[in-house]
Image (cartoon, rainbow, N blue to C red):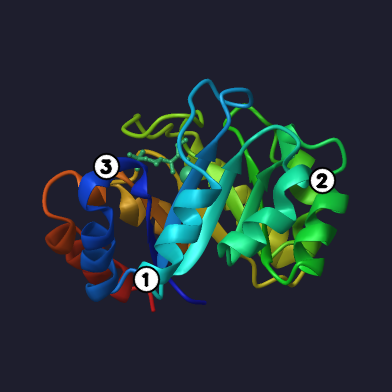
């Protein structure tokens, strides 16, 4: 299993975004996590298609797009055109999640499925064999800089167990409140893709990325 860091640019300094992305790429972050918010599914609004289309030229990192938007089926083709590699949707935001997952695959992207902290993990169970990555929210989606919800660790373990029982080598990404101080607990629970916004971009993104990569390297 591959262990990967996905810095979330939600916490980056947008006036020097290209430079900050480069610092994470140079120090080993293979993914770039891109949070799209619509002001409906979550209360805030972040950034969207034109920003993604612009940054795709500036990095070779895998563009890991997390859609916190209602009815994401409407935008699958557009995110492919803008440069998404992974497209993650929320179970709670779709009428027919299987159809959206199918459409993401038809558009030649990897499909991710996410659930909010209050959603029962069993609701995602039937979709695990259809997706490339499961994204466990460990904070309430919508804002960077929140505190990790401790119950998320048991939820990660539960999803890893469900995947293993089905013989699936599933990527499990965890998003929200992850710092150098708690990342090992998240990895030990069964996650292999780590999203970190504040912990990478507050302070020195080079040093922060390096320190995360040092920890991740013990899991290779
Ligand atoms: C929250 C977003 C996260 C956010 C994480 O809704 O999905 O990706 O950027 O930020 P931190 O790492 O600061 O909790
Ligand atoms: Zn996210």
Mark pair 2, 1: CA separation? 30 Å
Q: Which mark is residue 59?
A: 1
Q: Closer to the observer: label 3 or label 1?
A: 1
Mark 1 nearby-residue class (10 Å; few <14, some 14–19, many ≥20): some
| Residue 128 percent coordinates (x, y) | 75, 58
Q: At numbered mark 2, what does the secondary structure look like: helix, strand or loop? A: helix
Q: Is residue 13 left or right of residue 2?
A: left
- In this picture, is 187 found above or below 40? below
Visible in this render: residue 180? no
Q: Is mark 1 within 8 Å of ligand 1?
A: no
| Quadrant of the image occupied by residue 41 | top right
Mark pair 3, 2: CA separation? 30 Å
Residue marked by disc 2: 97
| Residue 56 percent coordinates (x, y) | 45, 66
Q: Residue at x 57, y 31 (%)?
A: 117
Q: Residue at x 51, y 32 (%)?
A: 141
Mark pair 3, 1: CA separation? 20 Å
């Amino acid at each position: 299993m591959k262990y990967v860091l996905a810095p979330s640019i939600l916490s980056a300094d947008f006036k020097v975004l290209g430079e900050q992305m480069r610092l994470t790429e140079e120090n080993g972050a293979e993914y770039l996590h891109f949070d799209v918010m619509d002001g409906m599914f979550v209360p805030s609004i972040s950034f969207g298609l034109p920003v993604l289309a612009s940054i795709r030229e500036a990095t070779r990192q895998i563009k890991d797009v997390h859609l916190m938007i209602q009815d994401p089926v409407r935008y699958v083709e557009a995110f492919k055109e803008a440069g998404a590699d992974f497209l993650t949707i929320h179970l709670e935001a779709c009428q027919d999640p299987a159809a959206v997952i199918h459409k993401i695959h038809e558009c030649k992207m990897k499909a991710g499925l996410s659930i909010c902290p209050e959603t029962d993990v069993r609701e995602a169970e039937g979709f695990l064999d259809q997706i490339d990555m499961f994204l466990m929210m460990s904070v309430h989606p919508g804002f960077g800089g929140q505190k990790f919800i401790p119950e998320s660790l048991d939820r990660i373990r539960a999803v890893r167990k469900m995947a293993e029982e089905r013989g699936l080598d599933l990527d499990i990404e965890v998003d929200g409140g992850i710092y150098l101080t708690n990342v090992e607990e998240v990895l030990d629970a069964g996650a292999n893709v780590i999203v970190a916004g504040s912990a990478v971009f507050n302070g020195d993104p080079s040093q922060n990325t390096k320190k995360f990569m040092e920890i991740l390297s013990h899991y290779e």
